[in-house]
């Protein structure tokens, strides 16, 4: 059996005297789609931020792609392999194209390839009719789709999506759910933190449940 | 005092393109613009660091820069005068009573304005900007520049305010520039001189230009901010 894409052992995160996370073991398999559930304040967002290098934590062992990785300081190579999308994503006040192109420029992707990936991402997210719209004028659902397209265009090895359907209207949720299902079908490695029953019960998503700082796989 | 006649004369001077008037206007504009262009990048960078980084003495540094805002410009002029005077440590450079001396003074006057406004703009920025940039793979420098670009209207306000402050400054310019006609006489120093001589028409004409410049840069800023508001 091949090594998991991501393996974490002994992850601890304290806030003052309170231990928020005390995860002994977490594996994410390559090509696997996961939902991370748990009550409000259970540490879902914090865990994702730690994995994305946006928050420090004590970690005994961290492996990515089968190789051990030191998290302090968080390696830039890992930052490019794992992409995190906020619950309410920030879209830069430029253009939709520039937003999607941003991470590609950070990776020095050649211009022709950038243009191809930007066009594909816009089509994937169904935002072809909104190219000329300033991102700040987009609806919450469109911003979420733009952020998903921006992250997907980078072809990351692991996508971390924080409550992607929260605070969206019915149409926005339906469109975002369809994109999540597509990510699963494309065999992208994706971890989605959520409360949304429709996401939790999406076919093919394995469930991880966070409670009292610990993580446990759940059926369904 | 009759204001009508000097005002009529002021318009006549402006329309006739009086060379003394134009010389003072040109000097004011280019010295102010050059000073702001030179001092803006380091001041904005320092403002960003003071807003984002936590380090020992950071708070004291912010208080010090804020205190510089209320520093009298004549005292800045005096300090530069002492540095540049023949017996001063930089006297050998022979910069006293030159446009360069005025420019140095303007840079020192604009510096705290630019730093404090940038701190305010960056501290008010959405923390997701920097995080999003980092999460998308940007290094620290690129993510910082992205943050500055997102708060560009606040930073632009800093630059415009800095320019507005120095273009109308008089105390420092007189001390280190000497108000020499054709060399270091600019709009505010010319107004001060002409008024003491009773030449109100010149003073009013220059005052109108100064107000037009101040109004112009602020209209430009408002237009840009308005455009930003429509994002």
Image (tube, rainbow, N blue to C red):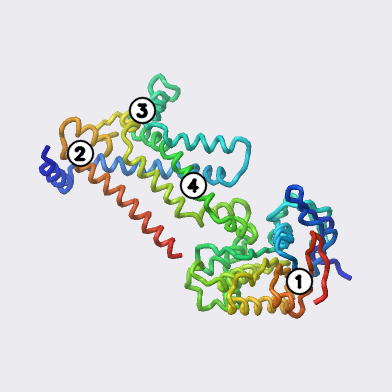
Which residue is depicted at the point 68% across and 76% down?
A180
- Residue B60, quarter of the rendered image: top right
- The reply to whether residue A180 is visible in this rendering is yes
Q: Chain of mark 2?
A: B
**Which label belongs to residue B96?**
3
Q: CA distance from mark 3 to mark 4?
A: 31 Å
Q: Residues within 10 Å of mark 4 (few under 14, many from 20)?
A: many
**Residue pointed to by mark 1:** A34
Dot 1 surroundings within 10 Å: few (below 14), some, or many (20 or more)? many
Q: Is residue A78 shown to the viewer in this render?
A: no
Q: Have a look at marks 1 and 3 and say if they share a chain.
A: no
Label 4 or label 2, whichever comes before in sequence order: 4
Q: CA distance from mark 4 to mark 2?
A: 34 Å
| Cα distance between the residues tagged 1 and 2 | 74 Å
Residue bearing the label numbered 2: B203
Q: CA distance from mark 1 to mark 3?
A: 71 Å
The N terminus of chain A sits in image quarter: bottom right
Marks 1/4: CA distance? Answer: 42 Å
Tags 1 and 3 touching, CB below 8 Å: no
Look at the numbered disc 3 and give the secondary structure of its residue. loop
Tell me which residue sits at (73%, 47%) in the image: A16
Residue B90 appears at what percent x and percent y?
A: 43, 25
Determine which residue is flagged by label 4: B118
Q: Nearer the viewer, residue A101 or A206?
A: A206
């Amino acid at each position: 059996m091949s090594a998991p894409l991501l393996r974490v052992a002994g992850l601890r995160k304290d806030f003052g005297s309170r231990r928020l996370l005390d995860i002994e073991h977490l594996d994410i398999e390559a090509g696997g789609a996961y939902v991370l559930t748990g009550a409000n304040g259970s540490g879902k967002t914090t865990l994702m931020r730690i994995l994305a290098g946006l928050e420090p934590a004590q970690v005994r062992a961290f492996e990515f792609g089968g190789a051990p990785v030191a998290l302090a300081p968080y390696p830039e190579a890992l930052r490019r392999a794992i992409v995190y999308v906020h619950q309410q994503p920030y879209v830069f006040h430029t253009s939709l194209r520039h937003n999607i192109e941003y991470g590609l420029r950070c990776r020095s992707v050649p211009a022709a390839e950038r243009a191809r990936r930007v066009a594909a991402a816009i089509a994937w997210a169904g935002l072809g009719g909104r190219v000329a719209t300033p991102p700040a004028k987009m609806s919450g659902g469109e911003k979420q789709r733009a952020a998903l397209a921006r992250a997907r265009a980078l072809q990351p090895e692991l996508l971390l999506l924080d409550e992607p359907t929260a605070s969206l209207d019915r149409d926005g949720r339906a469109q975002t759910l369809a994109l999540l299902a597509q990510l699963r079908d494309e065999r992208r490695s994706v971890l989605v933190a959520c409360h949304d029953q429709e996401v939790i019960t999406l076919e093919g998503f394995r469930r991880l449940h966070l409670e009292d700082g610990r993580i446990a796989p759940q059926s369904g | 005092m009759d204001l009508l006649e000097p005002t009529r004369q002021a318009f006549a001077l402006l329309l006739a393109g009086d060379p003394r008037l134009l010389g003072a206007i040109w000097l004011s504009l280019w010295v102010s613009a050059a000073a702001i262009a030179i001092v803006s990048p380091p001041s904005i960078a320092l403002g960003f660091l003071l807003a984002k980084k936590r380090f020992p003495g950071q708070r004291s540094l912010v208080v010090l820069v804020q205190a510089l805002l209320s520093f009298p410009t004549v005292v800045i002029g005096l300090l530069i005068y002492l540095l540049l005077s023949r017996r001063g440590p930089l006297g050998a450079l022979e910069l006293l009573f030159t446009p360069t001396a005025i420019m140095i003074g303007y840079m020192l006057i604009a510096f705290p304005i630019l730093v404090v406004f940038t701190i305010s703009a960056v501290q008010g920025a959405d923390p997701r900007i920097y995080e999003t940039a980092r999460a998308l793979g940007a290094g620290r420098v690129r993510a910082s520049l992205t943050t500055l670009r997102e708060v560009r209207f606040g930073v632009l306000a800093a630059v415009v305010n800095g320019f507005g402050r120095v273009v109308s400054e008089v105390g420092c310019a007189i001390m280190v520039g000497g108000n020499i006609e054709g060399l270091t006489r600019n709009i505010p120093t010319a107004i001060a001189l002409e008024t003491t001589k009773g030449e109100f028409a010149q003073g009013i004409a220059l005052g109108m230009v100064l107000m037009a410049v101040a109004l112009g840069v602020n209209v430009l800023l408002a237009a840009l901010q308005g455009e930003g508001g429509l994002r």
